[in-house]
Amino acid sequence: MAVPALEVLSEKRCFGGVQGFYRYESSACGGPMRFGVFRPERSGRVPALLFLAGLTCTEETFAIKAGAQRVAAELGLALVTPDTSPRETGIEGATGDWEFGEGAGFWLDATQAPYAGRFGMESVVVRELPMLLDAHFGIDVARLGISGHSMGGHGALTLALRHPQRFRSLSAFAPIVAPMQVPWGQKAFPRYLGNDETAWRGHDATALMADGHGFDGPILIDQGADDAFLAEQLRPELFQAACDAANQPLLLRQHAGYDHSYWFIQSFIEDHLRHHARVLSP
Ligand SMILES: N[C@@H](CCC(=O)N[C@@H](CS)C(=O)NCC(=O)O)C(=O)O
């Protein structure tokens, strides 16, 4: 498959490297998709951490709010931030609800009309972005890690468990770990995947772990104990139990006083960058 052409939206010098935003024609999403890349100043190919953002976020949110570039520059780690869905799809029902549709692509390839063919975020992350990173950014796509926040934490966990050969390191902030069991997933999955719950299991980190899809390496999860979504939507204890049963190494840290925001992410991002760098550039 041909590598898509790249349109540069902006590029700015940052900690000796470049923070850029880009657009390309996505075949998985049947239209334009945007993403950000922080490329540290290093000679030769560099490893990259893909960071998947949460509901209502864009390719800019992590780049602007997480404060990750200084340490990524020090570690020689690129940062890649895809948008959370295609935009201006014109699909009825895909706008106007912050929990579903545009801004809420749930990091899967929709199989149901009218979303199939437009909401192909899994293919964006595992197929299209690696091609672009390899061809246009000097990134070593044999050394990719993945992380994310909330809906993006769900994406990081499920995509790493579904594609263990693609991602070598894994972490998450306040992830949705069991979408089949919580309102956010129960709203999105029937619309994107249909009513057959067996199709949902392949996109639920807790179910994947229970079904034998482990990760070859330790998983790091940070969770704010004062996160307003913790008890109803996130429920990390469900994933912890599945990991314990599967003998999957998981470090789940609960932090008193922290909520769901990027103030929380900003406080612990350095630990995640070092967790990934230990595997990606030892
Ligand atoms: N819009 C929602 C909140 C959505 C939300 O908290 N989104 C999280 C991801 S699930 C986020 O990171 N928002 C962007 C930000 O905090 O800058 C509300 O009003 O309750």
Image (cartoon, helix red, strand yellow):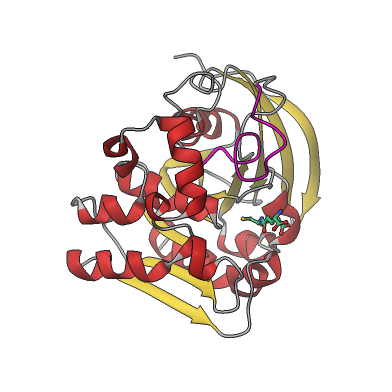
Quadrant of the picture in which ligand 1 is shown: bottom right
Which residue extends farthest top? 2
What's the magenta region?
92-106
Check the image and report above or below for 131 versus 181: above
22 vs 228, nearest the viewer: 228
254 vs 21, nearest the viewer: 254
Q: Main secondary structure of the magenta part?
A: loop
Asked if residue 260 is among those painted magenta in the image, a careful observer would answer no
Check the image and report above or below for 255 versus 39: below
Quadrant of the rendered image containing residue 85: top right
**Residue 33: x percent and y percent?**
64, 28
Q: Quadrant of the C terminus?
A: bottom left
**Residue 112: x percent and y percent?**
44, 23
Left or right of 121? Residue 94 is: right
Q: Quadrant of the N terminus?
A: top left
Identity of the residue drawn at 30% across and 44% down:
201
Asked if residue 104 is among those painted magenta in the image, a careful observer would answer yes
**Residue 44: x percent and y percent?**
53, 44
Check the image and report above or below for 168 versus 59: below
19 vs 150, nearest the viewer: 150
**Residue 36: x percent and y percent?**
67, 41
Left or right of 252? Residue 46 is: right
93 vs 249, nearest the viewer: 93
